[in-house]
Image (spheres, rainbow, N blue to C red):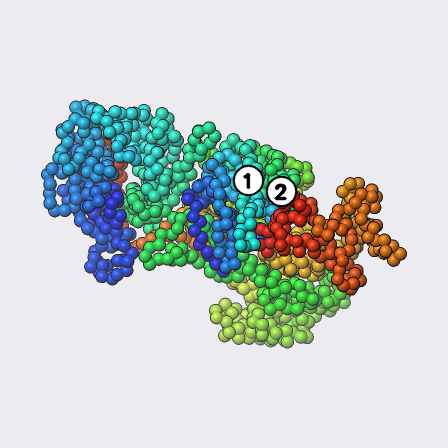
Amino acid sequence: MFDVEPIIADHKDVIHDVVFDYYGRRMATCSSDQTVKIWDEDDHGKFNVTSSWKAHSGSIWRVTWANPEFGQVIATCSFDRTASVWEEVLGEKVSNSNAYTRRWVRRTTLVDSRTSVTDLEFAPKYLGLLLATASADGIIRIYEAPDIMNLSQWPVQHDIANKLSLSCLSWNTSTYMVPQLLAAGSDEAATPTGKVFLFAYYENARKCVKMETVNDITDPVTDVAFAPNAGRTFHMLAVASKDLYIVNIRGVTDSTGNAKLELQTLKFSEHNCPVWRVCWNMLATMLISTGDDGCVRIWRMNYARQWKCAAVLKAEGGGPTYEPTPPTPTMATTASATAKFYKKGSIGNQVPWH
Amino acid sequence: MSGNIHGISWFPNFPNKFVSWGQEINLYEVRSKNKDEAPVTTTTTPEQPSRLPYIAVNYLANETRYQYARCVAASYNSEQPIIAVGLADGKIGICNFRDSYDSSWEYTPRQQRMSTCLAWNEQDAQLLAMGHDKHRNDYCITIWDIEQGVPKVDANFFGLGEAANSLCWDHHHRMLIAGMSQKLIKLFDLRQSNASCQSIQTKTVQGLSVAPNGNYLCSYVDSLIMLWDLRALERPLRQIQSSRNHLQIGWCPSRSALLSSVQRESPYITLYDIRCVETCANSREVYHVKRQISPIPSQLHFNAVHCLAWHPRDVERALLVADAANILDFRLPVSLLTAYNNRSKLPLLLQRPLQETSTNNADNALSLDYLERELLEDDLLEQTRQRALQNYGLQRKASEPQPQLSAYLRNVWHTLGNVHSEGRLLGLKSTLGIQLGHTSEALMASARIETQLLQWPDGINNSSKLLSYRSEQRDVALQLCGWCSDANLDRFIDELYARQEFSRAAMICVFHLKLLAACNILSRAADKVRDPSMYRITAIALSSFNADRCSSAWRQQRSSANLQIQDAHLRAIFSFLTMEQDNFEPVLKEEGISLADRAYMDASSDVQTVALVAINYFRKEHFQDNRIQYWIASYLDYLNSWGLWEKRAELDIKLEQIRASARSSRTVYLACNFCGKSVSNALLDEPRPRSTTTSTNRLSSCPSCRKPLPRCALCLMHMGTMMHSSSDANAAAQTKPFSKWFSWCQTCRHGGHTEHIMQWFKQNSECPVSSCNCRCFDLDNSLRDIS
């Protein structure tokens, strides 16, 4: 079991993302009100805002933490076509205590994108300080800070163009398979093609190429998330689209020695509405998905190794606010039988109901 | 019967009253939650639920004079609820739901045609703008001050020979905005006497509405929504094309720019969150975030939303008409955001504070429904953490059963302990002698195999004989699996029974063809457990088993029953009894039988156990394997992320013991700042007895280039010199304690003896080197807090 703790974020506008740091003791949120907030857990396990600042001049879509090995570093991306890297530094000593004020300093602004930067994520730590961004014009850019003591230099290492605009990306954190996988999703609604792409990042050859498209998912995708993998021989990718999908990915080597991916797509339609966000727990034994209707669904694997929705979390408005008394059957039938269409402001001299 | 409802509207100044119109016009009052609970009100109005079953309202009054209203608008009057009703013949009536009938509150246009739209002014609550259809000799827009009698003055009429499609007032209530004749939006500024007029050429003339922020104007036609900025009307801000035709659009009053749209024959409402980004050089870019939600609760099966009315004050609350006759109260769902955290707590971020209704607190407003509670019960994550805290896998005798483990894992450890105690760190298979090199013939030849003919026990007519193989290997294998040799069978089964592993005990009995014993066990088990049916049925089935008739009927039954029997051991029993010839495949393939009973299955995500088994039992050659390294690294990473540094360090020590084949070479070297040659050799060499007296001099400079070595910033002694320690006992120790070492700040590169530095930073925050402002000691502060 787990505890559920509601937190009032006090952002002035829609919150788009929330992420925890490596230790689970700090939380970063970003919002359309153009601010980022950093929350710290106190001794009683409550999260309190310790920093809040205006970070961009547009909606901030995503925020991501770097591994603590690189210091207290986050990156944000925004509709204002930029991504920024921030580092926490110590300021003045607070009088009569041993603590120092902290503030977040912008170390760099990545301005390469010509359109909204929709998602970004730091690569697994063993690859170095690497940041992948996805933008609405369909380009994935991979930046690297060659000197981790100097966060102001982030040359672009790779630049992969796609035909469709991108909405989300996710690194595979497992070192189980070389090359490293990077998944990206598109929210393009017009074309009926596959919307999730898998890229391979070869660390040694320093190249990044598209490997596969998940053709089973043709609806616009809003979020993708690789499951943390500690030892499984296959990878799991959760995809938030019109429905929830879990893609099992197995790396195989064919007869010619080329690495290939075997994909198996599972679909879960319980949400009844577009799924907005997905995330895994640490051991990938639990999947949490958030729907547009404000319901959070918690998925667990059952004894037969099938994913089942184990719990639903609703806030007010997510369900009926007033307990309905069942209508008399006659009323229900007449209501639907006499349902007539009425268009406001239609032009015509005939009055349709006379 | 209220009949079809064509529209609803809240009264802007009566937050709990609303009006619905259609075949008749009704005034309702929303019951507050407090009243709702008081039984008095509910009993006095027993007929209410039938009128509007899905919303808690009191019916107040209705207006019978005006039937089949074409359009209705609720006024801003704060004294009484007043509505204006536009009829199909053009007549506009004002109604306050009282009995007194005032003929001066009715306006009839000179030429009879349909009235199309109405708009009350917020500032002057008696001012009403009325729109009519086209007539070549008449005006289409009339402004009526209802206190001043029917309008006659020319200044009150606009748009001769045109048609009004929609009307609204601007933010300051001085400008009337009208969509006209399907091709124009006109803005009439009423502050000037002759009503100057701006116009925009556009086809989107329906549903004009000004956003709560006062700047945006929206309009639509068919499936196209157009957004305008009232400060710059030259070109539209944004066009939003959707796949369905819009029925109604409107701004949510509690948000700065949230546009809602009700679409034809759709159970969804579409929300467009309009945002603006200031890009460089005064240029603005407007974009929107689209969201589609179904406001109809899933247990009600309505097909379409026809109309939506935002509450004027309550946050994101609206009424909506579903399937033409049902009114629902609706609030935009609070988007919940959550993220994974390495603990079992699930934090939920709410987009806005939950509306605390009088009785509900935040806990009630947030509901958690369990669909499959048992799936959530054992959380591997929490187990892993607890086990880590309890030194899982760190005991000296790792084979000791650990109380918090499941039976399955106890078996694993037990088996491995057995293998280990044999002194043979070989794989399970090689212990069994079925390595790849051994063919079965070689096995047969090498091992002494006793073949026995086993009789089925009494009571079962059996013509066929069964072969049973006995060999030394078999005994070893059985032992490894945690089974026992035949001699001790009874004792073993009693043990299993005591451990409540009934089905396993029964299975082993059956495998040894002791059906009666199995039946006994099962029937006794059935008495003990809560849900005995499965055991009972199995017992009955077993007792009626007859080897002669272990025929197709049984097999068929089994294959269908297999799907229903959830206990892997019981399934195995049936598989065993119904096997054809010597085909044990189904028994062996039965998943879920613990490792002790069959080959090891790595199906769980329990990397902890896997890593710990590897650490405890694998030999160092195995550690070359990428997978095993990865398992261990992952587990160490988890311990790090939980902040269990000590446990991780203990494991590291254990790992180092395994790997310590060769002494690991030194990983840290000291190089001279000037010549780049290593200083550490000279420094770390044990001083030879004869040179002890000169050691201080020897270490003050680089051995190769003779440049001075760095000095402690506090005592100004060169690196490598011993500190003046109070006791000489320390000097005798082979290794210097950490506090005597030299250390540096990685940022400013200043440093000295650790003990000195620590003392310095107890009182100071800045680097001891003068004019260096580095806060060396606090640089790691954020990390330290966390640990």
| Tag 1 and tag 2 share a subunit | yes
Chain bearing mark 2? A
When the figure is inspected, residue A63 is found, relative to residue B396, above or below; the finding is above
Q: Residue at x 16, y 23 (%)?
A: B137
The three-letter code of the residue at mark 1 reads Arg
Q: Quadrant of the C terminus of chain B?
A: bottom right
Q: Residue at x 64, y 68 (%)?
A: B401
Horizontal placement of B404 versus B218: left or right? right
Find numbered disc 1 in the image and state the secondary structure of the residue it sits on. Answer: strand
x%, y% of residue B21?
A: 22, 43
Q: Residue at x 71, y 57 (%)?
A: B739
The three-letter code of the residue at mark 2 reads Leu
When the figure is inspected, residue B247 is found, relative to residue B30, above or below; the finding is above
Horizontal placement of B304 versus B655: left or right? left
Horizontal placement of A209 versus B449: left or right? left
Give whichever of discs 1 and 2 has the lower sequence position.
1
| Residue that label 2 marks | A129
When the figure is inspected, residue B29 is found, relative to residue A86, above or below; the finding is below
Please name whichever residue, B253 or A253, is drawn nearer the observer in this view of the structure: B253
Residue A73: image quadrant is top right
